[in-house]
């Protein structure tokens, strides 16, 4: 009963507009004070322990490298590279939106970062070519969902740290699911643009044009290659990969492109620090919740409940999908993972579900929540960038949500799409 009151208090504070990490801290601390089930010093100890992992350093560096790519002009060069191959086809710019998000996802690991970097470039161009504004905004929002899924997704770092899963296995396990999502977005784009009256494009595929666009974009494409090589080979830790990629982008932006100045670099560092601090605050308070969930035996209660109703792995995954899709509509992905990830993962393992597979299913659900109101973080970003109302962008996003849900079925019920590459690289 006490744990139920804790969750009610936490969600109530969140709905009243209090920051998520404060809501979690207040609810958890109130539990300890009211029940006496732990020393008060445990609050400070758990906050320190929650931030003690060196792997946490990867998060601010992945955020930073995405921001630096944007101000250095690497995002624009990556877009030109994509347009060279698909720009001449009808709807080429729309397809390029998905492709650029896939490439950018290999660096930033964040949906909002991808949207903020790519949409200001693409939205005006799509408007010039005659794309409906609400379609353009919705497509940019949907493509940005790939950011946290295609490695190195920041949510995977969170999940690995709180559940002791392998970061490398999660990264590699998310690669095919991310491409499946991109494939279904491409299919929907083909259907949608077929009915549109778009202006003809001027892109031509010639060897001269290829070498020119490759020369312009080659240095930009090396950044994701650094991360891919580091993750696949295991020669560096995830934190070291993030630092190397950041150093590379910073060097190219300052000394080669000469687009990164002291002024805009300061702004980027400030923005990264503010964003990272909110994430670290969540990690600090997560330990309190982990403690009270263990004390109250909530994990054992859920295991007994699953055994009582004799749930199969199929039904369990179905219920998990419904639960996290709903959760993604009302709260941010990070606290949802911090609270429920360690709780549900042992049950999934007991039912014979691969832990990496379950982790990717959970993350995929919550990332789709970035497109669903009332929270819908990507919808708010695209609404602001496009100048359209939130409601209009949300309505236009519904077909894209449907495409992503179809891909989710494949990810959920065909486990090898997640487990094949990790098993190939790391073994079973």
Image (cartoon, rainbow, N blue to C red):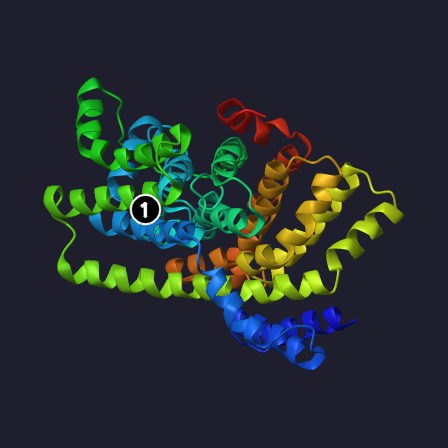
Residue identifier under label 1: 128
x and y percent of residue 320 in the render? 71, 48
x and y percent of residue 24 in the render? 58, 70
Q: What quarter of the picture does the N terminus occupy?
A: bottom right
Q: Is residue 120 left or right of residue 421?
A: left
Helix, strand or loop under label 1: helix
At horizontal 63% and vertical 52% (from top left) the residue drawn is 342
In the foreground, 149 or 39: 39
Q: What quarter of the picture does the C terminus occupy?
A: top right
In this view, 175 is above or below 122: above
In the foreground, 194 or 7: 7
Within-10-Å neighbours for mark 1: few <14, some 14–19, many 20+: few
User: Residue placed farthest to the bottom in the image?
Assistant: 34
At horizontal 17% and vertical 21% (from top left) the residue drawn is 208
Residue 264: quarter of image: bottom left
x and y percent of residue 407 in the render? 60, 36
- Would you say residue 201 is visible in this rendering? no
Q: Is residue 233 left or right of residue 45?
A: left
x and y percent of residue 73 in the render? 22, 46
At horizontal 52% and vertical 30% (from top left) the residue drawn is 176
Residue 215: quarter of image: top left
Looking at the rendered structure, the number of numbered marks drawn on it comes to: 1
- Would you say residue 63 is visible in this rendering? yes
């Amino acid at each position: 009963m006490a744990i139920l009151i804790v969750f009610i208090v936490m969600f109530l504070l969140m709905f009243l507009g209090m920051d998520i990490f404060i809501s979690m801290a207040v609810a958890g601390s109130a539990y300890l004070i009211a029940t006496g089930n732990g020393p008060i010093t445990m609050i400070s100890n758990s906050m320190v322990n929650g931030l003690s992992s060196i792997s946490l350093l990867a998060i601010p560096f992945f955020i930073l490298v995405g921001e630096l790519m944007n101000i250095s002009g690497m995002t624009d060069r990556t877009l030109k590279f994509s347009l060279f191959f698909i720009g001449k086809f009808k709807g080429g710019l729309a397809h390029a939106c998905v492709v650029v998000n896939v490439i950018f996802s290999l660096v930033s690991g964040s949906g909002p970062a991808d949207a903020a970097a790519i949409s200001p470039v693409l939205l005006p161009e799509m408007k010039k070519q005659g794309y409906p504004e609400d379609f353009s905004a919705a497509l940019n929002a949907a493509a940005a969902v790939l950011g946290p899924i295609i490695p190195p997704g920041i949510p995977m770092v969170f999940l690995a740290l709180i559940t002791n899963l392998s970061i490398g296995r999660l990264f590699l396990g998310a690669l095919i699911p991310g491409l499946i999502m991109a494939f279904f977005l491409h299919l929907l784009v083909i259907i949608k643009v077929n009915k549109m009256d778009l202006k003809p494009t001027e892109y031509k595929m010639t060897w001269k044009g290829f070498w020119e666009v490759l020369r312009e974009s080659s240095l930009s494409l090396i950044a994701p290659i650094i991360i891919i090589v580091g993750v696949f080979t295991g020669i560096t830790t995830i934190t070291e990969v993030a630092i190397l990629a950041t150093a590379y982008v910073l060097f190219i932006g300052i000394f080669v492109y000469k687009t990164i100045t002291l002024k805009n670099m300061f702004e980027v560092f400030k923005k990264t620090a503010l964003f990272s601090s909110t994430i670290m605050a969540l990690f600090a308070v997560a330990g309190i919740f982990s403690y009270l969930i263990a004390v109250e035996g909530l994990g054992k209660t859920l295991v007994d409940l699953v055994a009582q109703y004799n749930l199969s792995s199929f039904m369990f995954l179905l219920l998990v999908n419904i639960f996290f899709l709903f959760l993604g509509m009302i709260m941010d992905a990070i606290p949802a993972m911090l609270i429920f990830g360690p709780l549900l993962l042992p049950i999934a393992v007991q039912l014979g579900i691969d832990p990496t597979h379950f982790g990717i299913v959970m993350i995929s659900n919550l990332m789709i929540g970035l497109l669903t109101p009332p929270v819908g973080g990507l919808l708010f970003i695209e609404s602001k960038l496009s100048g359209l109302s939130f409601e209009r962008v949300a309505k236009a996003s519904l077909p894209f949500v449907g495409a992503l849900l179809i891909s989710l079925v494949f990810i959920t019920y065909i486990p090898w799409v997640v487990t094949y590459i990790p098993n190939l690289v790391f073994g079973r």
